[in-house]
Amino acid sequence: MRKFTEKAVVGLSEVGLGLDELVRHGARQVIQQAIEAELSALLERFENVKTLHGQRAVVRNGYLPEREVLTAAGPIPVKVPKVRDRSGSGVKFNSSIVPPYVRKSPRVSAALPWLYLKGISTGDMSEALSVLLGEDAKGLSANVVSRLKAQWADEHAIWSRRDLSNSRYVYWWVDGIHTGLRSENSDGQCLLVIIGVRPDGRKERVAIGDGYRESKASWQELLLDLKSRGLQAGPLLAVGDGAMGFWAALEEVFPTTRGQRCWFHKMGNVLNALPKSQQGKAKADLQAIWMAATRADAYAAFDRFVTLYAAKYPKATETLKKDRESLLAFYDFPAEHWQHLRTTNAIESTFATVRHRTTRTRNCVSRPTFLGLAFKLIEEAEKTWRRINGPEQIQLLLEGIAFQDGEPVQDDQPGQQKLAA
């Protein structure tokens, strides 16, 4: 087989061929050539950028530690070069052929729960993974997958017993996830998921349990378990949809926590009660409510919607009216946080693939397996979570400062006393 020139390798990359395709043309040598060609292109782009002393600003700076990438030809060692940006503008080199996140085993482990939840049984896992990793991928037999599932279940069990006495949460996103998986006891099993925001603004897994059809009893059991492990108080605000037993359970276990109904779910419920011919305009009218700058403006948009649609579509307006105050609770919190508080998107985005799955697993799963799979899914997703906007505002909330229309309410009295003195 003839050797590929750097020009040819760049051509392969430009037409969209991925890592596996390049491996078929020469494995390690071609991968390394392709990475070097990518680096050359980057250096050429910044060739005319100079420092104040006339030196090239972006130059080579050695290699990252060698690592293995699992490919169709088996594990391939690669060395990705680094660059140094003398100008301080932050230029970095990331290979598109071998991205920073491509590893031998962590990405394989991350793919397995998704494949299982999408309807691939243990016996079919190796065949499914061969599509992603090549026919020669090693160490991915049904026995290995079974051991991994048992390990995930153990990890979830240990995590679910962790001490929470030092934990504090400002916000929670709460949802019940119906995966379609059949459990040993029932088809009504669903995941009960809570994701929280810590005082430093970081998002964190709080609870991953299971229950029967999102019942009050199931949520109450989960919340009481959190309390028994040391959680002193609930969050200031919990965000969720209206079809859960969570709200009744929350009122009994953490009664001081306020509730914010998810606008994504509410808009879906309202629009479903309208004919398709009206849904486009109605959607814009609903958005005018939760996008209003102040609570007063939101009330005005709310009343306008009811006036426009109540006569012809009473079911739609009643669906909206019953949760009026809980839909607008976010106005009593920092404006920087509003985009996080109006929906349960933190959970929705994590489980989007599961929610839209069209097949069912051909075998029932045990309760530990069911929870272990969910645990690994959220663990992987958590690596990409970012802090919420305006984390510095959290301290004001924890100090008991009230917010109105997203702004802190200033108490003029202390200032007046100071001025008089």
Image (tube, rainbow, N blue to C red):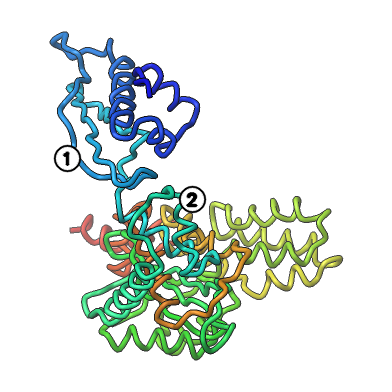
Instruction: Kindly identify which numbered label has been placed on residue 65.
Output: 1
Tag 1's secondary structure?
loop
Q: Measuring from the top left, give residue 418's x and y in whole percent.
A: 21, 58
Image quarter hosting the C terminus? bottom left
Of 152 and 77, the residue lying toward us: 77
Residue 67 position, x and y percent, is: 22, 43
Give the number of the disc on residue 185: none
User: On screen, 167 above or below 48?
Assistant: below
Q: Which residue is drawn at 35% across and 31% down?
A: 26
Among numbered discs 2 and 1, the one appearing first in the sequence:
1
Q: Residue 194, relative to residue 307: is it above or below? A: below
Residue type highlighted by circle 2: Val
Tell me if mark 2 has few (under 14), some (14-19) or many (20+) residues whose alpha carbon lies within 10 angstroms of its own. Answer: few
Q: Mark 2 points at which residue?
A: 131
**Is 152 or 22 nearer to us in this picture?**
22
Q: Could one spot residue 68 in this view of the protein?
A: yes
* Residue 242 x %, y %: 59, 75
- In three-dimensional space, the C-alpha distance between marks 2 and 1, rounded to whole angstroms, equals 28 Å
> From the viewer's perspective, is 187 left or right of 340?
right
Q: Residue furthest right?
A: 312
- The type of residue carrying mark 1 is Pro
Residue at point 38%, 16% (across, down): 7
Circle 2 SS class: helix
Q: Nearer the viewer, residue 78 or 198?
A: 78
